[in-house]
Amino acid sequence: MSKFTAIVMKAADNVATVTEKVAANTEVTMNVEGNLLTVCAKDMIPFGHKVAICAISSGEKIIKYGEVIGKATRDIQIGEHTHVHNLGGCRGRGDLEN
């Protein structure tokens, strides 16, 4: 069995949560509804933070655990750390309207 380094809860998610600190240029592996998905981290991603698992356009909704948690404030590439520097929250911080 593979060791997964990120969690994706729903197939609709466009980000995954890393389960350990990930160095830049490292493969991040996850199970998406029974299918292995691997992306290459473009940045160092701290434990518990998000990584983009598909390209996300500026203004597009960020979906985690099947729920909208915010919008991209700029284009985000596959494998890029997704956090406050490129994500406006609509939950928790509440800096954006839904």
Image (cartoon, rainbow, N blue to C red):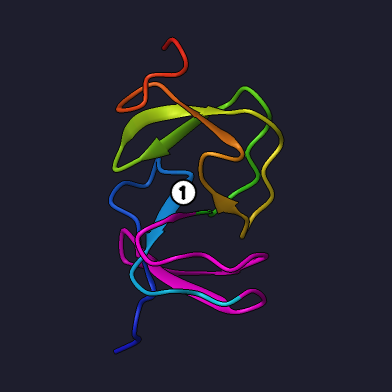
Q: Which residues are magenta?
A: 24-50
Q: Residue furthest bottom?
A: 1
Q: Amino acid at mark 1?
A: Val
Q: Quadrant of the C terminus?
A: top left
Task: Tell me the quarter of the picture where residue 63 sits.
Answer: top left
- Which residue sits at x=30%, y=28%? 92
Q: Residue 42: give x, y in percent of width and height.
A: 67, 65
Vertical placement of residue 65 versus 38, above or below = above
Q: Residue 45: give x, y in percent of width and height.
A: 52, 65
- Which residue sits at x=31%, y=58%? 33
| Horizontal side of residue 51 vs 64, given as left or right | right
Query: 9 or 11: which is nearer to us?
Result: 9
Residue 48 drawn in magenta: yes
Vertical placement of residue 43 versus 1, above or below = above
Instruction: Residue under label 1, please give it.
Output: 15
| Horizontal side of residue 9 vs 28, given as left or right | left
Query: 84 or 80: which is nearer to us?
Result: 84
Residue 34 drawn in magenta: yes
Q: How many marks?
A: 1
